[in-house]
Image (cartoon, helix red, strand yellow):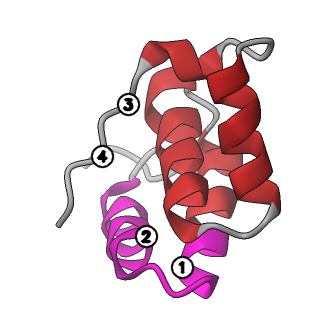
Amino acid sequence: MRVIPLVSFLFYLDWPERRFIDRCIEAGNADAILRQGLTEYFWIGRRGIGMELLSRAWMEVSVEAGYLSAMLLLCDHENEEEM
């Protein structure tokens, strides 16, 4: 699996780098969608949006996003009662 560094400067909306990533996401770039999905899920903590983006990246033929989505769904036990 490729190394995908999550760099904090990408979260600042007014930076040119952030706008570039946003344009890549709008264009359907699977790697950019995957990065944003990981950022939303892990760094920002918005799991619903993160999973939607990971699913979208998977639909754009990102094997990594499909694997991560499956693993996250298997490991998400938040709604289950503790045994």
70 to the left or right of 18: left
Residue 57 position by quadrant: bottom right
Foreground pick, 54 / 11: 11
Q: Name the residue under label 1.
A: 58
Q: What element carries label 3?
A: loop
**For marks 2 and 4 on the same chain, the one whose residue lies earlier in the sequence:** 4
Compared with 12, 63 (above or below) is below
Residue labelled with disc 2: 65
Quadrant for residue 25, please give it.
bottom right
Q: Pointer 3 and pointer 4: residues touching (CB < 8 Å)?
A: yes
Q: Which mark, by number, is residue 4?
A: 4
Left or right: 26 in relation to 3: right
Element class at badge 4: loop
Question: x, y (%) of residue 34?
Answer: 51, 57
Measured in 3D between alpha carbons, the distance from the residue under mark 1 to the one under mark 2, in whole angstroms, is 5 Å
Alpha-carbon span between mark 3 and mark 4: 6 Å
Where in the figure is residue 18, as x and y percent of width and height? 68, 27
Cα separation, mark 1 vs mark 3, equals: 19 Å
Binning the other alpha carbons within 10 Å of mark 4 as few (below 14), some (14 to 19) or many (20 upward) gives few
Q: Is residue 69 magenta?
A: yes
Nearest the viewer among 70 and 1 is 1
Report the magenta stretch's main SS.
Answer: helix
* Quadrant of the snapshot with the N terminus: bottom left
User: Please, is residue 36 above or below residue 16 in the view?
Assistant: below
The region drawn magenta spans 55-76
The amino acid type, in three-letter code, at marker 4 is Ile
* Closer to us: 77 or 65: 65
Using the image, tell me which numbered label, if any, was put on residue 6. 3
Asked if marks 2 and 4 touch (Cβ < 8 Å), the reply is no
Q: Is mark 1 on a helix, strand or loop?
A: helix
Q: Which of marks 3 and 2 is in front?
A: 3
Label 1 vs 2, first from the N-terminus: 1
